[in-house]
Image (spheres, rainbow, N blue to C red):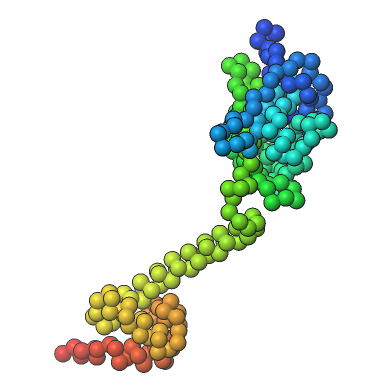
Amino acid sequence: MSFPAPPRRRPSDASTAHHPRPGVGTAPSPRTAPVPKAPVPDGGPCAAGRFRYDRGTGVWSWSPEMFAILGIDPGTTDPGTEALVRWQHPDDRVRTLNAFAAACAGRAFALEVRAAGEARAVVLVGEPELDPEAGVTAVAGLCADITAGRPPGSDGDRARELEAEVGQLRAAMASRAVIEQAKGILMLLTSCRDQTAFDLLGHISSHTHRKIRDVARAITESATGGARLPEEIRAILRDACPPTPHLP
């Protein structure tokens, strides 16, 4: 797959350096340019590689580290869009293609993608190379293996854990709201303070074997006319609330 080429430049401005190996489905280019190697820290080789896509020629170039990260043999496979997305998990391929298309329109990107059939993941970072007259002439970037730094578990497991946490947070927020409403009702009925109202909710909860949020919901629904207050809760509140004085 290739992306739209930029407007043609004047011959004097044309690039004279291209990778000797063409991308998939493109014609060979006779001109060559070195691909910069990924930095190597003191602790050992860095799991990162570089790539570049020339929009004018449709030619891709990958550093040796890029081939190594993807586990692709440079002697049998040409660098290019097809090779890159074929390595990826099917669910990540469209995101990658959309990211490169956006980069060709002038927007940088950074995204995490997974390997197909492997518990590996890399981060792709790409930036457009801009020309004042021709616009985006190329997309260059970095591919870094982040597998070792990821938490254990599959992406599905992490997604389910996150959904569960969000659900628990929403439930806690809803419970807090209804408990605060019930406390206000009890404070009004018993002329007590905030903590005493909460203690009364706890007392009702322990004696009726209901959760505090369920007791609070029953009280608020009864106060708004949405439901009749259960008799066991009514009996405890009757003992707790002072008699209503008769007006003269």
Q: Quadrant of residue 218?
A: bottom left
Q: Nearer the viewer, residue 109 or 64?
A: 64
Q: Nearer the viewer, residue 219 or 88?
A: 88
Query: Can residue 169 be seen in this snapshot?
Result: yes
Tell me: residue 121, above or below residue 172: above
Q: Quadrant of residue 209?
A: bottom left
Q: Taking 90 as reference, is 44 left or right? A: left
Residue sitting at 45 percent across and 68 percent down?
Answer: 172
- Return the x and y of residue 187 as percentages of the image width and height: 28, 78
Query: Can residue 217 be seen in this snapshot?
Result: no
Residue sitting at 20 percent across and 90 percent down?
Answer: 246
- Return the x and y of residue 150 as percentages of the image width and height: 59, 50
Q: Quadrant of residue 58?
A: top right
Tell me: residue 210, above or below residue 119: below
Residue sitting at 23 percent across and 80 percent down?
Answer: 191
Residue sitting at the far top? 12
- Return the x and y of residue 185 as percentages of the image width and height: 32, 77
Q: Quadrant of the N terminus?
A: top right
- Return the x and y of residue 29 as percentages of the image width and height: 79, 18
Q: Number of marks in the image?
A: 0
Q: Quadrant of the C terminus?
A: bottom left
Residue sitting at the far left? 248
Residue sitting at 70 percent across and 13 percent down?
Answer: 16
